[in-house]
Image (spheres, helix red, strand yellow):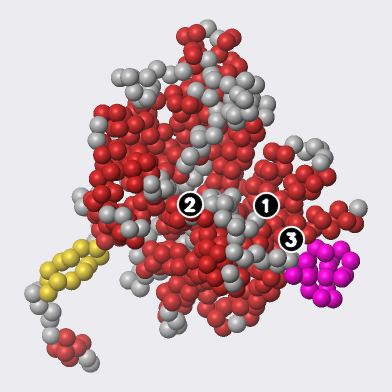
Amino acid sequence: MIEDLAFIGQIAVKSSIAVLLATLGEIITERSGVLNLGVEGMMLAGALCGMAAGVVTGNPFAAAAAGALAGGLLALVHAFFAVTLKVNQVLSGLALTILGMGLTSFLGRPLIGVRPGVRLRAVPIPGLSDIPLIGDIFFQQSLLAYLAYLLVPLCWYLLYRTGAGLKIRAAGEDAAAVDAAGIDVFRIRYLCTFIGGIGAGLAGAYLSLSYTPGWKESMTGGQGWVAIAMVIFATWNPLRAVIGAFLFGFLTALQFYFQAVGMELIPAYILKMLPYVLTILVMVVVHAGPGRRFGGPAALGIPFSREG
Amino acid sequence: MAWRIEKRTLSGERAPWWVFPAALFFAVFVGALIFIGLGVNPLEAYAAMLKGSVGSFFHFSEVVVRAIPLILTGLAVAMAATMLLWNIGCEGQLVWGGICAAGTGLFLAPHLPPFLVIPVTIVAGAGGGALWALIPGLLKAFLNVNEILTSLLLNYIAIIFMEHLYFGPWRNPEGFGFPGTAQISDLARIPHFLGTRIHLGLVLALVLAALIYGGLRYTRWGYRVRAIGLNPRAAGYAGFSIRRQIVGVMLLSGALAGIAGMAEVSGIHFRLQQGLAVGYGYDGIIVAWLARLNPLAVPLAALLLGALIVGGEQLQSLLHLPASISMVLEAVLLFGLLLSETLARYRLVRRPDAPDRSAAKKETAP
């Protein structure tokens, strides 16, 4: 029984890391007032570039960094259109997703079936990994998972306890006021969109370097969209992002568990659907839940221009 | 005399004529850069794409074949967007249309009078798509849940279910392990024209485009939809039931995408199999915005995208470039459209020599 729990728990955490990283990034982006629906495309770019850099350099850090950078660079395309040109952010984000899907499908062709140059294997943390159950679940993960653990409180601290975080949140609530205070709204929004891209890129790199090493077309399987939904579920709070990501990971893990045990308790295709159904359900809960203030940034998706 | 960039004051519905050509030029230009980066002569690449898409009657007929589902998903997106709804779930609705059409063709057709088979198939396809779109529609109307995310996530669920059907209970027992259902009954196949693969779906799509154009423009329902799209709050004050309109428009939008899936199954594949969900739902977004949400312009935009897709496939067979280059070009085209629409918001005006500022200052100084 304990072994089963440890097994499910470990895979649940493993399956939640990509969504968690992408959610954290998108929270920062949206907090600054920019809606970037290109997460899926940026994740794919991160996955492909991470894997490719791994093959070329053989260095896991260079691989992860390349993945993050790829996501960040794509995000800058969105920033240019959304912040500078002030176009419809939904359309620009969708275009970015299509661009990411097309580019990775196109450029990734030679990498299909290639053995990944590096893998980020699980690194047990001495001491912590010996704790029964907890150690198995949380502390026998890859380095990117530990990075995600650290980023949750860090993002929260950044947003709620630093001057920079105050500026970011203010830019997402009332950009004109921020501008009047002499702070550069454009710079904040560019930077936050870039950070969001880094998060999505890292999430993709995690998939291609650690979770399912190797490159496969559309290997993100909608996790980018799940992440955007989880931002709403988390009500734009990095600490709550953990819950959404873990729920997603848990339902993904159930598939592996039933497969491993060989039980056909629930048909495989229903299990496969569950993470997506859950993501829709959590959004419904946020909107229908009793007495919850639905606190999205007031200026989310609204471009700022000085002329008014 | 000095030139100055000025924001247009009237943001009327009409954009300058050059918006679309400029977007196309941008896409062609960026595409050329990509080809050069790949070590391919861009002229050669574009020549191959042109020849492969409009070079002969047969090739052009293939473009039309691709344009059929694109017209329908383009109309679906445009119809919803007219009321500020984002139906990004056309892919899933298309899949459900295909599932219902295949189900009708496989299991229901033998029990129906022959003349009823095709009408029932069409209705089933439209109904399947409409019901799948009802979920995000109801969630949006009554709980204000973001329809972009719900409709999109439902795509994945629909595809998983379709795969379950043709890998599992609906799998062709004589298919030698090939994933797909058996062929649908001959009676359930929609007619083809001119010895090509162009099928009845084209007629349906064009008639629907005209109907939606007329419906939006000349009926009370269309007036409401457009009014809500222009200003939801004012329309609410005017007593329009916004909820009912949201649900209704999503149902219609889903039905259009469902018909696209039905036509693919009953006109092209004749069975449910891999290759039904190839992205026509997502392409519909680009078609709708290229057409500036005008239902009558949708077929033209769909033809262009169809040509891009067929042209991309030609690149694969002639120059051995992956066909997904067309997806990259689609995205670049959409970005190009956003870019040129932004430019259109400004205009270059000539103004007389700037007045002497210091003089003006003096006057206002106390």
Q: Position of residue B27 (x, y in %)?
A: 30, 54
Asked if residue A8 is positioned above or below residue B105 in the image, the reply reads below
| The C terminus of chain B: image quadrant | bottom left
How busy is the neighbourhood of tag 1: few (under 14 within 10 Å), some, or many (20 plus)? some
Nearer the observer, disc 2 or disc 1? Answer: 2
What residue is at 59 percent from the left and 64 percent from the top?
A: A117
Query: Which amino acid lies under the numbered mark 3 shown in the image of this protein?
Result: Val
Residue assigned mark 1: A282
What residue is at 37 percent from the left and 68 percent from the top?
A: A84
Given residues B63 and B11, the one toward you in this image is B63
In the picture, the disc for residue A13 is: 3
Q: Position of residue A203 (x, y in %)?
A: 60, 63
Query: Which amino acid lies under the numbered mark 2 shown in the image of this protein?
Result: Arg
Query: Which amino acid lies under the numbered mark 1 shown in the image of this protein?
Result: Val
Same subunit: marks 3 and 2: yes
Mark 3–mark 1 Cα distance, whole angstroms, equals 18 Å
Mark closer to the chain start, 3 or 2: 3
Mark 2–mark 1 Cα distance, whole angstroms, equals 36 Å
In the picture, the disc for residue B195 is: none
Asked if residue B267 lies left or right of residue B332, the reply is right
What residue is at 52 percent from the left and 78 percent from the top?
A: A167
Residue that sits furthest to the top in the current view: B113
Q: Position of residue A19 (x, y in %)?
A: 63, 59
Q: Are marks 2 and 1 in contact (CB under 8 Å)?
A: no
Magenta stretch: residue B78 in it?
no
